[in-house]
C-alpha cells in the first residue's frame, strides 16, 4: 500500500539517482586507476564525459535527505538521530571493514588475522572502498540535522533565500573561481559543501518560486560547460579539467539543483509510483553499498571492462549487468533478519 507521507517526486528522483550512481562508477573505475595515456585519450574522454552526465546523482541524494529530514512536518528528535547514526556505524563495521579487508587480500594476495585489525583501523580512518565516504558524510549530516532544522523552521522565506545565496557564493562560486583562475580568494563563509546541498534540498522542496524554466536552461548549459571543458582539456593537455572533479563546483551545483527542480515540477502532483520505482527505492541503499563489489569482481577477477567491447556497448552492458546483480542481491539481503535493519 502506498505510504501517504512519501513524496512521489522524491521517490522517482531517488530511483533515477540510484541508476545514475551505478552508471557513474561503471565509468569512473578505470579512470581512477589508469591514466589517459594508458586508456587512450578518446576512451578516457568518453568515460569522463559519461561521468559528468550523471554528476548530479550524489548531490540529489543529499538534497533528498535535506528535503525529507528538514521538512517542518517531519518530527525529529535525538532518539531518531541516534538511530540513524547507529545504522551508519553498523554499516561501517560490516560493509566498511569487509571492503577494507577485501582490498588488503587483493593487494597482499593472502589472508591473516592481522589483516582484520588493519581493515578495522583503515575503516576508522576512512580508508575503506572509496564509495564508503558517503556513509561518513551521512553521519555528519545526521548530527547537524536538529540544529539545522531548528534554524530553518524559524527563518522567513526571504531570510532562507539570503542564507542560500551566501552559502552558495562562499561554498561554490569562490572555490570555482579559485580553481579556474588559479587564485586564492578568501571566503569567510566557510560551510561544508555537503551541508549546503542538504539545506538546498530543503529550500528547493519548500520554495514557491517558479524555477522550472531556469532549471531547464541551467541543466544543459552547465552540462555542456563541463563536457566541453573536460574534453578540450584532455585532448590539449592529457589531463582532466580540475574544476569538473571537485565537489565545490558551481556547474555541479547548477546541474544538481536543476535536476531536482525538474523532477519536482514534473512529478510533484503525481499520486502513485510504479512497481519498478518502488522496488528500486526499496533497495536503493543496498544497491549503493553493494554495486562496487560486482564492479570489482567483473573488472579485476573476470578481467572484463567496458573496453572489452566497443566502448559504448561495453558501458551499457556492464551497467545493466552490475545494476541487476546489485538489485537482486540487495533485495535478497533485505529479506534477511538483522541485515534488513541496516539496508
Image (spheres, rainbow, N blue to C red):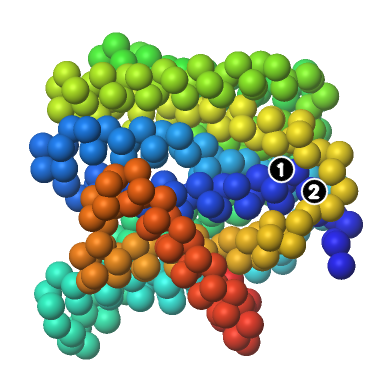
Say the numbered circle drawn on residue 67: 1
Q: Is 326 on the left or on the right of 208, as rendered?
A: left
Name which residue lies at 18% across and 32% down.
Answer: 41
Res. 293 visible in picture? yes
**Disc 2 element:** loop
Q: Nearer the viewer, residue 316 or 153?
A: 316
Q: Is 274 on the left or on the right of 231, as rendered?
A: right
Viewer-nearest of labels 1 and 2?
2
Name which residue lies at 69% across and 30% down.
Answer: 261
The quadrant the N terminus occupies is: bottom right
Q: Is 98 on the left or on the right of 61, as rendered?
A: left
Corner quadrant of residue 86:
bottom right
Position of residue 60 relative to residue 19, above or below, is: above
Dot 1, how many residues are within 10 Å of its Cα: few (below 14), some (14-19), or many (20+)? many
Corner quadrant of residue 255:
top right
**Disc 1 element:** helix
Q: Nearer the viewer, residue 210 or 44?
A: 44
Q: Position of residue 136 (x, y in %)?
A: 46, 56
Res. 251 visible in picture? no
Q: Position of residue 343 (x, y in %)?
A: 58, 71
Dot 2, how many residues are within 10 Å of its Cα: few (below 14), some (14-19), or many (20+)? some
Position of residue 286 relative to residue 109, above or below, is: above
Q: Nearer the viewer, residue 139 or 25?
A: 25
Name which residue lies at 78% across and 54% down.
Answer: 273
Say the numbered circle drawn on residue 7: 2
Q: Position of residue 297 (x, y in %)?
A: 30, 70
Among the two numbered marks 1 and 2 on one chain, the one whose residue lies closer to the N terminus? 2
Mark 1 → mark 2, Cα distance in angstroms: 10 Å
Q: Position of residue 116 (x, y in %)?
A: 27, 81
Name which residue lies at 35% across and 48% down.
Answer: 313
Position of residue 126 relative to residue 188, above or below, is: below
Q: Is 248 on the left or on the right of 274, as rendered?
A: left
Amino acid at each position: 500500500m502506498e505510504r501517504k507521507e512519501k513524496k512521489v517526486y522524491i521517490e522517482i528522483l531517488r530511483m533515477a539517482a540510484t541508476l545514475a550512481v551505478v552508471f557513474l562508477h561503471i565509468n569512473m573505475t578505470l579512470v581512477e586507476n589508469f591514466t589517459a595515456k594508458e586508456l587512450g585519450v578518446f576512451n578516457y574522454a568518453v568515460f569522463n564525459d559519461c561521468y559528468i552526465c550523471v554528476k548530479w546523482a550524489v548531490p540529489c541524494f543529499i538534497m533528498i535527505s535535506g528535503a525529507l529530514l528538514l521538512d517542518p512536518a517531519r518530527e525529529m528528535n535525538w532518539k531518531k538521530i541516534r538511530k540513524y547514526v547507529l545504522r551508519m556505524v553498523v554499516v561501517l563495521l560490516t560493509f566498511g571493514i569487509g571492503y577494507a579487508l577485501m582490498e588488503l587480500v587483493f593487494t597482499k594476495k593472502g589472508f591473516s588475522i592481522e589483516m582484520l585489525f588493519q581493515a578495522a583501523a583503515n575503516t576508522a580512518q576512512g580508508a575503506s572502498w572509496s564509495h564508503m565516504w558517503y556513509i561518513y558524510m551521512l553521519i555528519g549530516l545526521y548530527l547537524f540535522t536538529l540544529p539545522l532544522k531548528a534554524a530553518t523552521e524559524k527563518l522567513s522565506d526571504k531570510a532562507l533565500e539570503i542564507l542560500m545565496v551566501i552559502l552558495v557564493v562562499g561554498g561554490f562560486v569562490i572555490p570555482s573561481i579559485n580553481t579556474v583562475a588559479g587564485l586564492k580568494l578568501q571566503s569567510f563563509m566557510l560551510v561544508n559543501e555537503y551541508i549546503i546541498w542538504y539545506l538546498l534540498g530543503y529550500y528547493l522542496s519548500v520554495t514557491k518560486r517558479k524555477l522550472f524554466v531556469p532549471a531547464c536552461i541551467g541543466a544543459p548549459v552547465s552540462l555542456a560547460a563541463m563536457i566541453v571543458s573536460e574534453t578540450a582539456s584532455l585532448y590539449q593537455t592529457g589531463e582532466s579539467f580540475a574544476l569538473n572533479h571537485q565537489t565545490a563546483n558551481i556547474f555541479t551545483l547548477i546541474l544538481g539543483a536543476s535536476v531536482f527542480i525538474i523532477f519536482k515540477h514534473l512529478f510533484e502532483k503525481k499520486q502513485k509510483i510504479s512497481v519498478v520505482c518502488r522496488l528500486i527505492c526499496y533497495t536503493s541503499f543496498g544497491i549503493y553499498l553493494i554495486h562496487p563489489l560486482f564492479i570489482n569482481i567483473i573488472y579485476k577477477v573476470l578481467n572484463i571492462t567496458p573496453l572489452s567491447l566497443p566502448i559504448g556497448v561495453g558501458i551499457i552492458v556492464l551497467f545493466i549487468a552490475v545494476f541487476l546483480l546489485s538489485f537482486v542481491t540487495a533485495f535478497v539481503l533485505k529479506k534477511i533478519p538483522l541485515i534488513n535493519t541496516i539496508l
